[in-house]
Amino acid sequence: MANFDLRINGERVQVDVDPDTPVLWVLRDALQLVGTKYGCGVGQCGACTIHLDGVATRSCLLPVSAIGNQRITTIEGLSEKGNHPVQQAWIEHDVPQCGYCQAGQIMSAAALLEKNSNPSDAEIDLAMNGNLCRCGTYLRVKAAIKTAAGK
Amino acid sequence: MTIIKTTYNRRSFLKVSTAAGGGLVLGFNWLTSCTPTPEEVLAMPEEWFRVNAFLKIGDNGMVTILSPNPEIGQNVKTSMPMVVAEELDVDWDMVIVEQAPLDTDAFTRQVAGGSQSIRQGWQSLRMAGATARQLLLAAAAQQWQVPVSELTTDQGVIQHVASGKTIGYGEVASLAATLAVPEEVPLKDPKDFKIIGTSRKNVDGKKIATGEPLFGLDYHKDGMLIAMIVHAPAFGMKIKSLDDLAAKSMPGIRDVFVINTNPERDERMMQTFAFPDMVAVVGNSTWEVMQAKKKLVVEWESASPQESSALHDERLEQLLTERKPEPDRKDGNPDAAFASAVKIVERSYSAPFLAHNPMEPMNFFADVQTDKAELVGPIQTPQSMRKMVADLTGLAEEQISVMMTRQGGGFGRRLYGHFGVEAALISQQVKAPVKLIYTREDDMTYGTYRPAYKVVYRAGLDADNNLVAFHVKGAGTHGSPIFANRFPAGAVDHYLAESFTKPSNISTGAWRAPRSNFIAFAEQSFLDELAEVAGKDPIALRLELFDRAAAAPVGETNDYDPERYAGVLKLVREKSGWGQDMPGVHRGVSAYFCHNTYVAQVVDVVMTNDKPVVQKVWCAVDCGIVVNPDAARNQIEGGIVDGLGHGLFSAMTFEEGRPKHSNFNTYRLIRHAEAPKAIEVFFMDNGLDPTGLGEPSLPPIMAAFANALKKATGERLTNQPFVQETDVLG
Ligand code: FES
Ligand code: FES
């Protein structure tokens, strides 16, 4: 076990965990931030997507010891009132079915729009291809990204 | 307006309304209590009055509607309460929805499966709302000393037109909760619906978009431990020996032991408990338990022969060469009709095992004590899970509570609640609350898989290209895919359907639209081939057969209404502009009926860099009244993407009993870029009672795609998944 001083959602938090622990499980088990989801643990589904200094990153393969001073943003910290343009667009398009993959989809989409405020269909496909949705909400995800892109 | 008797399930209304009379404040459960939105907090009433099992009315007119059925992404948590609210006649903005726990006294059929939630709940949901409304009216009538018949309601307000008096539901709720339930209640005329038929947002939409705890895997209780299992690496194996010394000494580990969910190895239970004995590892955190699992040294031994996919293939091939003495159905004289047919078309089709792979892996919370147990988590069949837990823990069913969380997908996988039983046994052993979590690998390699299927179709045409003989023969690893009384039974004079099955020790089960998910592909691909040989337009050929089935049906039992079937085909023909010349666009059509719903689809394929791209799917649906149209479209879109994805890419195979795929790096699922570019859905507006919605759009899609692909490439693909079959798709 070791102590880590992390910057999560604008706050400093201390955790005492095994240095190999993936950030996903630090968030979910140690900090009760369960919005970030476990889907595969091998970087294939995107359910665990967070932002590391603003870049969409899979937290299931990222050991807590590798974080250092980088800023972590989770779905809970994406906006103060749940009103990030991407979150609003998600509600407007009523994107979710089961909803389980959606935190990861939203985090990937928000990071994409941060870099590219007006992505083409091909750019959306490329940025979002790592986020599986078993319920098949892909068309709505794309439509919601386009709505958010305008904001 | 219809008058219905309230006898159905009245016991629960009486019991709850008298027990709760006089203003019972029911505590919110974990799933909503810790996370009411700020808007909800502001609107919270001081007191809630429980009027019946489905609803509570607050003194300020807010209404809480309990959604009885498990929510697996089919959106019943929004649509079922909409039906209650409609008959109650309240403003939807005044409604809070809460998930009901398992309560067999209050509710019937708390199951998510077979696309039946709305269809079977339709009457009881409407009655719940209508009965409550009637009680509120009776209370107002009593207060004002006027006859009930002079009162009307509008969006949560009762009016007495003659005197101009009005009163809100909240103000009479306390009195209403003490009144006797009326014998009969009026139901609205569907043309007066204000909520049903209008699109309402997912009641959990904001919580999903902000990452609130909603799912089973998110559940937390103080003092809770984390548990994981290690099951045999191959079907047909059991534990020989266990060395857990190293695992037990890992940091954060509390205990390691063997549990057995089917101690007698009862054959009838083996399809749910394919791995009856397994090692349980219990510790403080998920990561620590995952690490300890790797330190276990388990020796396994054979309990029954281990099977490979090659063996399954052989078996199914073999079965299809046999002739059944007792066919599922026989009309006319098929042998003679084939002998005299001018043309005969024959084709076989196959599909592999499929894993369900809901995005949220199996998990369950259990806190088993000596005299009671609490179970919380994602389950499609809470009642049968409770029964199994009672049997194995020795508790009575009444001592066990079950709460359903929101579920990260089901697709049939959560019909088989062995994971809840495992969680309960582990909790009982460690005497502490535990949350059992499957890794993705645990989940994918302990499936209740869609079985592998093979089918052969044969059709005979006469000199005028009329279909005169039809023969379908189907075989499956655990269950045949044949529905003998479905189309084209009833439309052909000489018809034969035969089913073959071979049991397996690999557990199989219901996978979204069971059997239909394969047979629709085979049947509707075959009809296209038939149309080609007969030189007919594929829609015209199908309509011709429906005309026949409507005018002079063959046989006694035909499981479909040919006119409604033809209706969706005509609708999709019109909407898609079928028959128009569209350069570069290759079109295929398909139609199927299952879960009481009719669906017809046209798929437009364009070739881009020599690869087929689904440019658009046109989809006509007859599911009767659509409760929540935009959410219904979401379901239809999802079924299309799901069906296309699995038919194109997915397969589970076995080697010596071992599942060859255990995660998404080798088990391929459809991704964003591969989804159709557009889907347009058209609902038949016929005012009939609602039917299934979560499954019926899946079965027809692969045939529509295969039929379009045939036009685009000249090749007819018959074995799923298509990407294995040809590199055109890549
Ligand atoms: S859980 Fe991290 S990518 Fe799937
Ligand atoms: S909404 Fe269910 S997995 Fe995406």
Image (spheres, coloured by chain):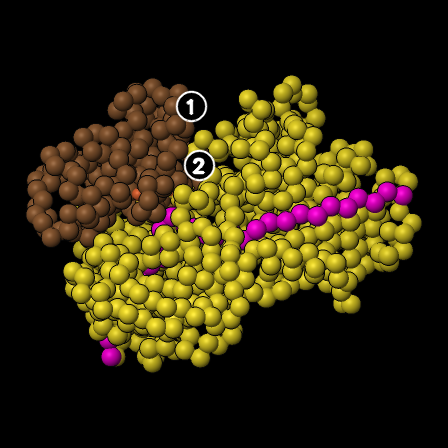
Chain colours: A brown, B yellow
Please say if the residues under marks 1 and 2 sit with CB atoms less than 8 Å apart.
Answer: no
Local secondary structure at mark 1: helix
- What residue do we see at 57% from left, 40% from top? B724
Residue kind at label 1, given as amino acid type: Ala
Residue B45 spot, x, y in % from top left: 21, 53
- What residue do we see at 52% from left, 52% from top? B653
- What residue do we see at 21% from left, 73% from top? B431
Specify the subunit that label 1 lies on. Answer: A
For residue B28, side relative to residue B203 (left or right): left
Is residue B201 visible in the rendered structure shown here? no
- What residue do we see at 51% from left, 60% from top? B656
Q: Nearer the viewer, residue A115 or B621?
A: A115
Give residue A7's quadrant in the image: top left
Give residue B343's quadrant in the image: top right
Is residue B326 visible in the rendered structure shown here? yes
Classify the position of ligand 2 by quadrant: top left, top right, bottom left or bottom right. Answer: top left
User: Is B354 colored magenta in this rendering?
Assistant: yes
Packing grade of label 1 (10 A; few <14, some 14-19, many >=20) is few
Query: In this picture, is B568 found above or below B383?
Result: above
Q: Which residues are magenta?
A: B342-370
Q: Which residue is mark 2?
A: B671
Q: How many marks?
A: 2
How far apart are the alpha carbons under marks 1 and 2? 13 Å
Residue B631 spot, x, y in % from top left: 44, 41
Query: In this picture, is B229 found above or below B389?
Result: above
For residue B283, side relative to residue B1 (left or right): left
Query: In this picture, is B429 found above or below A129?
Result: below
Residue kind at label 2, given as amino acid type: Arg
Q: Which residue is mark 1?
A: A122
